Image (spheres, rainbow, N blue to C red):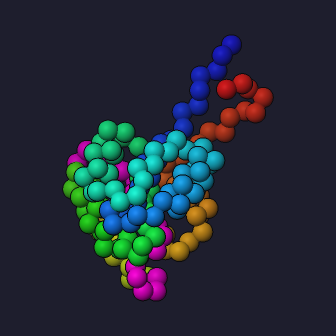
Amino acid sequence: MTQSPVQRPSVLLSSVSSDSHTWNLVYLALLLEENGYAVTNLGSCVPDDLLIASARELAPAAIVISSVNGHGRIDGARVIRKIRAAPDIASLPVVIGGKLGIGAAGEEQTQDLLDAGFTLVFGDADAHELSTALAGLVGVPAQRDPGVAA
């Protein structure tokens, strides 16, 4: 008897539009995949409209946005407002993390991003915290029985 493949929750991974860093996205994609998520990595410098169109097309379980350049607070607030204004994707869990401002990380920038519409905000947190938080938002991926052939 063949077992149907396990459906893995999908995550749309992106940077903010002004952020050209890529290694953070590669790391996060690998981390999320190792934790059982199907990841679509849009890459760096993703325009807001492309992120929104991709969310509509792919219908992910969640969106994860990473920022390394320190403009996550500004660019993130702009894109989350656009996402929350789009009725077809407005209810998606959206998480942002990384270097969100050019100054010291603080509760004020976190609160600003939560107020703008993000589901969760991570400053310079351990990326493994993301996996735990994401599991709480979209469910823990089912673990495949190692004795069953894929």
* Residue 61, visible in the rendered structure: no
In the rendered image, residue 47, in percent from the top left (x then y), is placed at 29, 56
Region rendered in magenta: 87-105
Residue at image location 43% in from the left, 67% down from the top: 67
| Relative depth, front residue between 100 and 22 | 22
Q: Quadrant of residue 94?
A: bottom left
| Relative depth, front residue between 12 and 86 | 12
Picture mark count: 0
Q: Is residue 96 magenta?
A: yes
Q: Residue furthest bottom?
A: 104
Residue at image location 55% in from the left, 44% down from the top: 37
Left or right of 106 on screen, residue 51 = left
In the rendered image, residue 69, in percent from the top left (x then y), is placed at 42, 73
In the rendered image, residue 43, in percent from the top left (x then y), is placed at 42, 53
In the rendered image, residue 5, in percent from the top left (x then y), is placed at 59, 26
Residue at image location 48% in from the left, 59% down from the top: 22
Q: Quadrant of the N terminus?
A: top right
Q: Quadrant of residue 74?
A: bottom left
- Does 29 appear above or below 125? above
